[in-house]
Each structure stands twice: as C-alpha cells, then as structure tokens.
Image (spheres, coloured by chain):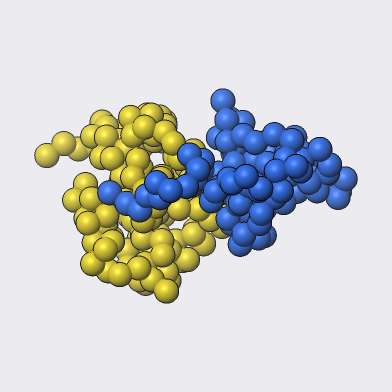
Chain colours: A yellow, B blue
Amino acid sequence: MPYDPAMVRPMKEEVTRLGAKQLATAAEVDKFFAEKKGTAFLFINSVCGCAAGGARPALRIALANDHLPDRIGTVFAGQDVEATSRARAAFADYPPSSPSAALLKDGEVVFFLPRHEIEGRDPASIAHTIVQAFDEHCALAKKA
Amino acid sequence: MGTFHHDKHELHGITVVVDTAGPSLYVGRCDDIDGQAVVLLDADVHEDGSGKGTKEDYLRRAAKVGVWKKLDRIAIPLDRVATLRRLADYNR
C-alpha cells in the first residue's frame, strides 16, 4: 500500500525545489527517458530516514556543482509505484534499491549509486560521489 | 526528514554481509540484531559451490551494484554468523 501522500510531500518537495522534475506516472517516466541525447539523472527518493535522510541533502549539495545533467527527474519509491517500476526498467541490470540514483548519458547508464553506498554516509560524502560522476560525464551548466 | 527507528540495533537500515562458516553468505538490509539472530530484510543468499562463483566473486559484484532480493525476511541464528560487515565496506 502506498504511503500517505501528505506524509511524503515534504520529502518530495525537498527534491523538486532543487529543480528535479517529479515523475508520478509511467507516462511521465517514459517522456523523461524518451530524449536519449545528453545526460539525464534520476533520483529514486524514499521515505527511509536511514538513507534518504542523507541522500536528499547530498543532492542539494551536488546540484550546486558547475557540471550538471541536462535533465533531472525523481520518482518516489513506495508512493509512485508504477513510475518507480518504469524508471527502474531504464537500468534493469541494477538490482532495485531506494534511495538510489542513476546517471544516463545518451541513453546508457554511466553511473549508478545504490542504496548501500548512501547508508550511513554524511551528505557531503555522498554528494562528493555524485559530483565526481557529474564532473566526468556532464557539461558545464548554464548559470542563470 | 524521514522514518527512523531508534529502538533498533545501530545497524538497522544498513545493508550488511553475513558470512557463515559454511557455504552460505547472506546480503540484506539489517532490520535488527537481538540476542538470538541477525534479522535481514530484502535479502539475497549465495551458496558457495553452487556453480555461481565464489563468495568473493559474488561480493565483488554485490558491493558494486547491490543484490537481487530472494527473501523478504530471514533470521540468521547468531551461532551461524562468522562475520558481519557493511556491504559498502567491501568497496573501501
């Protein structure tokens, strides 16, 4: 049974206010991945305080980086069940876990951050791992 | 913000590797450790000698990408536990 939407809303907003697009349906996920060219980062959000409580602040730090993905999306595991399942199909070689994150370049997974690499780490440390992937694979972001 | 469980063992929520003196090796999310058993959720089990590589081969892959869940929950008696480590430690 999915979580109460009111309970997860703040956790979703913590990510969407960073510029990530909330993908709530399979159709929205399909649209997000339909564009193959360039880089796309997908964050699988979750309610788990043990890991997601560090991952969301890490994402905030990482998204202040100079090199950024062209597109950033997020699904919420345990809430947007269909969307999460469809998103995971985009990196089906990787066992499902949440929170987790994947960076795709021209439609291919070039970086995957499984849950066990998030657990117990401080946000700055997690962000460092994500930023390394951004620096390696993403272009310089256009600053407003 | 999130869900925390302060009444659980400090490894609660952490993906761990439970090795045994025998052929079985378990990887899963630690739910709790009490005086009797290590309880794992969403766990996988590798059996050495099953033709799927050694424990080391399995752990190398698991540490990189995680594991495919075979068991929703398993309680491993403490007298079967040889070592208990975080999965992430195998990457460091």
Farthest residue toward the left?
A144
Q: Is residue A40 left or right of residue B85?
A: left
- Is B37 or A79 nearer to us in this picture? B37
Question: Which residue sits at x=42%, y=74%?
Answer: A1
Residue B51 image position (x, y, % from top left): 86, 48
Q: Is residue A89 left or right of residue B6?
A: right
- Residue B22 lies in quadrant: top right
| Residue B38 appearing in the image | yes
Q: Is residue A12 left or right of residue B84?
A: left
Q: Is residue B1 above or below residue A3?
A: above
Question: Which residue sits at x=35%, y=40%?
Answer: A54
Q: Is residue A66 above or below residue A21?
A: above
Residue A3 image position (x, y, % from top left): 35, 68
- Is A133 or A79 nearer to us in this picture? A79
Which quarter of the figure is the C terminus of chain B placed in? top right
| Residue A40 appearing in the image | no
Residue B87 image position (x, y, % from top left): 59, 37
Q: Is residue A129 left or right of residue B54?
A: left
Question: Which residue sits at x=22%, y=56%?
Answer: A10
Farthest residue toward the top?
B92
Residue A5 image position (x, y, % from top left): 27, 69
Tally of marks: 0
- Is A138 or B69 nearer to us in this picture? B69
- Residue B74 lies in quadrant: bottom right
